[in-house]
Amino acid sequence: MFNFKARQARLRALLKARTLDGILLATDEESSKNPYYMSGFGGTTGVLAVGIKGAALAVDARYTLRAMDEVSGARVI
């Protein structure tokens, strides 16, 4: 199993070093690689917001149950 929380912690360290508050990682029909790498969500529609204090994945209603099952280290909204 992948350690998504550790990946997010490394990303947060980079954000802090660059004095950034957060980053948005979006999926689209061609690529869902970034949100998957950071959270485990493999759906084709969603936005992962990673900030200094936490992470949240926003998905449409079609993916809510899937996201709740797949995502680690982020709140599903």
Image: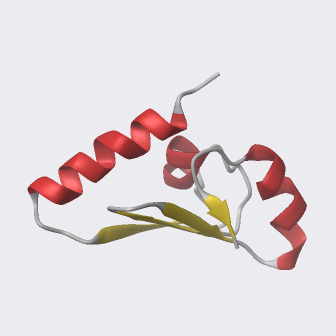
Q: Who is closer to the viewer here, 23 or 55?
A: 55
Q: What colour scheme has been applied to the protein in the rendered image?
A: secondary structure
45 vs 53, left or right, is right
Q: Residue furthest left?
A: 18
**Residue 46, position as x, y percentages in the image:** 65, 69
Q: Residue furthest front?
A: 53
- Which residue is rendered at x = 89% and y = 60% of the image? 65
- Which residue is rendered at x = 30% and y = 40% of the image? 10
**Residue 23, position as x, y percentages in the image:** 35, 67
Q: Quadrant of residue 30?
A: bottom right
Q: Who is closer to the viewer here, 42 or 53?
A: 53
Q: Quadrant of the C terminus?
A: bottom right
Q: Quadrant of residue 9?
A: top left
9 vs 77, left or right, is left
Q: Quadrant of residue 52?
A: bottom left
Q: Quadrant of the N terminus?
A: top right
**Residue 41, position as x, y percentages in the image:** 68, 50
Q: Who is closer to the viewer here, 25 or 3?
A: 3
- Which residue is rendered at x = 10% and y = 54% of the image? 17
Q: Residue furthest bottom?
A: 60
- Which residue is rendered at x = 83% and y = 65% of the image? 63
